[in-house]
Image: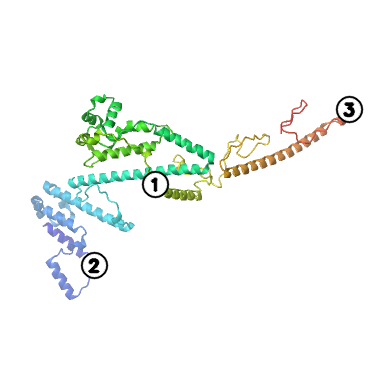
Amino acid sequence: MLKYLVLLVICFWSIHSLPVKESSTQKSSTEHNEEENPAQNLENIIEYERYLKEVVSLLESDTEFRKKLDSANEADIRSGKIAQELELVDHNVRTKLDELKRSELERLRGLAMQMYERTNEIDRRHLKIAEHLDHDNQHTFEIEDLRKLIVKTGEDLAEADRRRREEFKEYELQKEFEKQEKLREMDEDHRKKFEQDIKQMTEKHNKHQKVHHPGSKDQLEEVWEKQDHMSPEDFDPKKFFMMHDVDGNGFWDEQEVKALFKTELDKVYQQGLPEDDMRERAEEMERMREHVFKEADTDRDHLISFNEFIDQTRRREFQQDQGWDTVDQQPQFSHDEYLEFERRRQEEIQRLIAEGRLPPHPQMPYAYDPNMAGGQYQVPHPNAVPQYHPNVVPANQYHPNAVPQNHPQPEQQNNHGQNIQSQHQQQMNQQYSAQQAQQALHNQQMGQNVQQQQQQQQPPAQNQPNTVQQAVQSQPKPSSEKQPPNAHPQSNEIPHKQ
């Protein structure tokens, strides 16, 4: 009976379709084909034809539901009321229907993804797909999932180590570049002193205790004594492994292994000392970790098991301490690599200067400073109005009555800096001379105005004796010449401020 539901859908669709005229031969052949297989074109009509057929097949396999379907009328079937009988379907059939629905949903997601890719012109062949699990099996975790997870983890960790080594090489190249730039800007005396300081710091850095071979017996015994505070005579590899298996899972991971190198690293690198580079300490810890895993991790699962560690202690190399050369004792790049880095760095500096992100000043450091805002040199806007504190005189400006203070200028290290300083000093002298001349003219005008006011306020001196007039006329007139700033008047009057 349920199969006839499909036929009803087809008939209902054909009834509501527009009539199409056909020739007699085509009409006869079409009728003949429809009589043979009425549902042969169902796939062209219903996009989910396969899903429909599978659902019908599963429901027909249930005896109780088939009985309800046979006894139902056409109206209940067409309205979907018959779907209420699904509650009576066997549990196994319902489980298969659940799986069938999940499969249909995945198919629809795939169609939606294909439509999105076509709309946005996405090339699926070049998309990076996660490779740490089996995409073909989406419901159960099988052997292939575990294999893919182990292999992908190893590849990602190896890639992370490769990127770390490349970044450290860039760091060392940048250090050498900044050093050469400083030497290039110095004169002969300062260059010799700078090189002497570097030599002294290098010698001080190299004065340390012997660094044991990572993973050797001497290195582990020193950890046993200094970090674990145990007696050297009581060293036991089994107890040592258990003590440093922090999470107690029976394996040493990378973090637990790196914790074993603290004593060795403290011999070479100390925080706060100018001769010790903490970035090199971090790189040295990773190098020691890589070496220990290369020797002890035999199955390459990036974990050291208890058995792998015990096997390592039984080898002859475990008893021999060959020492260890730290990263600062090994060259990290060749001369050609440095020349290529210097060329690229100079091009980058010129580009930053052209973009206004670095000033073209010889004393400006070229190194990238992550502490600056945005990691860039902040250039003021050309139309920005400078903001000053109301009680602070802006730079290169002077108060009219202030006496200029001529401080000795520090010795410059190159001719370019001396030229800039001399030009700046000339501008300051010109500004000061102009301000002094303007102030002298202002004082002269003020003095004339005061003298005129005093003459207007004095009464006529007709009845005064001639001796008083002669005494006034005999007094010396105030000199209009400017007195030097350090000269003091002989009278008790308070001098006018210059």
Instruction: Single out the mark in the foreground, 1 or 3.
Output: 1
Secondary element type, mark 2? loop
Quarter location, residue 276: top left
From the top left corner, tell me how far across and down residue 64 is, in percent.
8, 50
Q: Tell which circle, 2 or 1, labels the residue nearer the N-terminal end.
A: 2
* Image height of 425 relative to 65, above or below: above
Residue 367 visible somewhere in the drawing: no
Q: Where is residue 418 in the image (x, y as percent from the top left)?
A: 59, 42
Instruction: Indicate how the structure is coloured in the image.
Output: rainbow
List x then y, in percent, for residue 38: 14, 65
Q: Which of marks 3 and 2 is in front?
A: 3
| Residue pictured at 40% horizontal, 36% vertical | 277
> How dense is the environment of label 2, judged by Cα within 10 Å: few (below 14), some, or many (20 and up)?
few
Judging by the rendered image, the residue that carries numbered circle 3 is: 468
Task: Tell me which amino acid carries mark 3.
Answer: Val
Q: Nearer the viewer, mark 2 or mark 1?
A: 1
User: Would residue 161 be visible to someone looking at this image?
Assistant: yes
Amino acid type, callout 2: Leu
Task: Identify residue for label 1.
Answer: 334
> Disc 1, disc 3: CB below 8 Å?
no
Q: How far apart are marks 3 and 2 (CA)?
A: 135 Å
Q: How crowded is mark 1: few (under 14 residues within 10 Å), some or many (20 or more)?
A: few
Question: Could you say which is closer to the camera, residue 340 or residue 150?
Answer: 340
Quickly name the residue at label 2: 18
